[in-house]
Amino acid sequence: MNSVTVRVPAKVNLQLAVGPLRDDGYHDLVNIFHAVSIFDEVTATAEIGVSVRVEGESADQVPEDDDNLAIQAALALARHAGRSYGVSLLIRKSIPVAGGMAGGSADAAAALVACNELWGLGLPTEDLLEIAADLGSDVPFALLGGTAVGTGRGERLSPLEVGGTFHWVFALADGGLSTAKVYAECDRMREAIGEQVAWPQAADPLLAALRGGDAKALGAELANDLQPAAVMLRRSLARTLDTGREYGALGALVSGSGPTCAFLAESEAHAGELALSLKAAGVARDVITAYGPVPGPTVV
Ligand code: ATP
C-alpha cells in the first residue's frame, strides 16, 4: 500500500467543567466531547523521511514542520513500533484553526490511524489511545469519535449513549484564541473574585438529555467554564452568542477555548435558517452547519 487517506471530525464540548488548578499546571476536567460533521482529511504516502503539507481553511496558520501535531503523531507511532519509518502527510483542513474544535488533535489522531495502516503495524486502538494521550489531552477523544466523557486532563474516556442526532450551527471568528491563554484568564478571573472552585462533575440532566436524544433539554444544559474567559479575551463573542439565542437557538456556547461559537438547533431545517440569520447579522467570519455525533477517524 502506497497511500492511505483518513477523514477525521471536529469536536464541540457539550460540558466543559474546569476544576481547581493542579500543582502540575493542569486542571482536572469533566469534558463531554461530541464529534461533529466538519472534517479534515489526512493522506499518508510512503516516503523517505517525515514531512507535512497543509491545504485549505487557514492553512497558512498551521506549521509545516515538527510542530505540526500530525508529524508528532507519526514520529511517536514510529518510536512506539521501535523502527524508523518515513511518511509524507498531506492535511486538507476544513476544521477552523485554533478555533476550540480540536483540529490539531484531530489531525494527530488521523495521522496515527493512517500511518498504522500504511506501515502495516496493525496496532490495536488501545495502543493508539496510549500514544494519543501523550500527544495531548484532546487526541484520545479524536481517535474515538461519537460522544464521550473525559476526566483527568480530559484523556480518561468513557463513551456515552446518545439517543439521536443533534443539529448544530458554528459561527467561526477571525483569528484563533490560544488555549493556554484562555485557561490562564480563567484562573485569573477566578482568583480575582476569590471563587471556591468546585470539583468538576458531569451534569446528570445533560447525560439524560443525550440518552433521550432531547435537543431542547440538551440546549438548556450546555455549559463551558472557559466561556467567561474566552468572552473576556474576545468581547465580540458575547454579541455572537446573544444573536444566536435571539434567533431561536436551543442553546449557545463557546466551543472549548473558542473563539468558535456553537448553537444547537431543533432540526436540520432550523439549523439552516439559524445559519442564514447569523450570516445576515454579520456577527461571524463564516457560519457552517453540522450534525453529531459522528464516528472517529475513518479510512476513505
Ligand atoms: P483545542 O480545542 O484542542 O484547544 P484548537 O481547536 O483551539 O484546539 P487547533 O486548531 O488544534 O486549536 O490549533 C492550535 C494550534 O496548534 C494552532 O495555533 C496551530 O499552530 C497548532 N497546530 C499544530 N498542528 C496543527 C494541525 N495539524 N492543525 C491545526 N493546528 C495545528
Image (cartoon, rainbow, N blue to C red):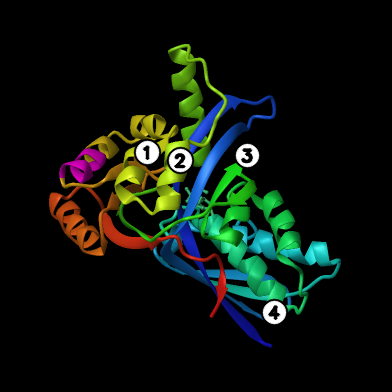
For image coordinates 50% across by 58% down, the residue present is: 62
- Is 9 displayed left or right of 283 in the figure? right
Q: How many marks?
A: 4
Q: Which residue is mark 4?
A: 118
Tag 3: amino acid: Arg
- Image coordinates for residue 48, horizontal then vertical, percent: 73, 78
For image coordinates 57% across by 25% down, the residue present is: 199
Confirm or deny contact between disc 3 and disc 1 (CB under 8 A): no
Confirm or deny contact between disc 4 and disc 3 (CB under 8 A): no
Magenta residue check for 175: no
Between the C-alphas of marks 1 and 4, the distance is: 42 Å
Q: Which residue is mark 3?
A: 153
Label at residue 15: 2
- Image coordinates for residue 133, horizontal then vertical, percent: 68, 50
Front position among marks 3 and 2:
2
Of labels 3 and 2, earlier in sequence is: 2
Q: In this orientation, which residue lies closer to the viewer: 208 or 254?
A: 208
For image coordinates 47% across by 15% down, the residue present is: 195
Between the C-alphas of marks 2 and 4, the distance is: 36 Å
- Label 1 environment density (alpha carbons within 10 Å; few <14, some 14–19, many ≥20): many
Magenta residue check for 241: yes
Front position among marks 2 and 1:
1
